[in-house]
Image (tube, rainbow, N blue to C red):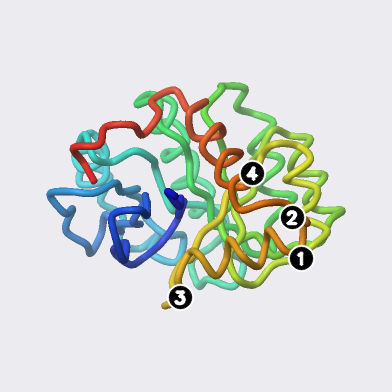
Amino acid sequence: MVSYDIHTHHNPEHQDIIAIVSIDATTDILPSTGYCSVGIHPDRVGEIDLNSLITIANHSNVVAIGETGLDKLASPLLHRQEELFIRHIELAEKLRKPLIIHCVRAWQELIAIRKRFTGDIPWIIHGFRGKGELAMQLLRFGCYLSFGWHHNSEAVRAAWEAHRLYVETDVLNISIEDVYQRITSQLSISREALSQEILENIQAWPQPINNKSLI
């Protein structure tokens, strides 16, 4: 059965894993095969190269924009992070590709920006560890939540019931199957049900990832 890893920094372990590998536009080289997302992390605001970002983002195997977002623990000033984040949003809307978002302690700022953009591009909060109340707030604004190994079970339940759930491995050197097992156990659902839900969420993207030649 196919597994979907919506955000990772590692190449997939085998062909049954469809993974979106995060590429930093300021440092990384785009691989010739496989699905990728490309962005400039908020802690790299001082290394902005929008021309490089735009060039890489147009490649066919780039299926999402990011990770990008807001991080109050990062050194750059928040207003500069916001400016860069908005450029990513505009690029995602122009290219019709989902947005992979990194957010740390800047939820109200994120929601304020979200209110300014009414397009249908999916906003996916990656590595979400917040509580159920915050999850419900983000879901009400149309965001999707992606969960890794560390997460809050109430938030997982809220995203599942809203049909806005993804799973990921991020930087951890673990199997996506471990994350699947952890989440299915918490939700008391089958492995097949979780995989089908994630697939349906991906198929709703403006440009679904279904080109098997990229795998």
Q: Which residue in the protein does label 4 denote?
A: 193
Direction from residue 99 to residue 131 in the image, left or right: right
Q: Which secondary structure, mark 2?
A: helix
- Label located before the other in sequence (3 or 2): 2
- Label located before the other in sequence (1 or 3): 1
Furthest toward the bottom, the residue is 173
Label of residue 152 in the image: 1
Q: Which residue in the protein does label 3 denote?
A: 174
Crowding at mark 1 (Cα within 10 Å: few <14, some 14-19, many 20+): some
Crowding at mark 3 (Cα within 10 Å: few <14, some 14-19, many 20+): some
Circles 2 and 1 in contact, beta carbons < 8 Å: yes
> Which mark lies nearer to you, 4 or 1?
4
Circles 1 and 3 in contact, beta carbons < 8 Å: no
Q: Which residue in the protein does label 2 denote?
A: 156
Q: Residue at x 40, y 29 (%)?
A: 208
Cα–Cα gap, marks 4 and 1: 20 Å
Seen from the viewer's position, the closer of residues 87 and 25 is: 25
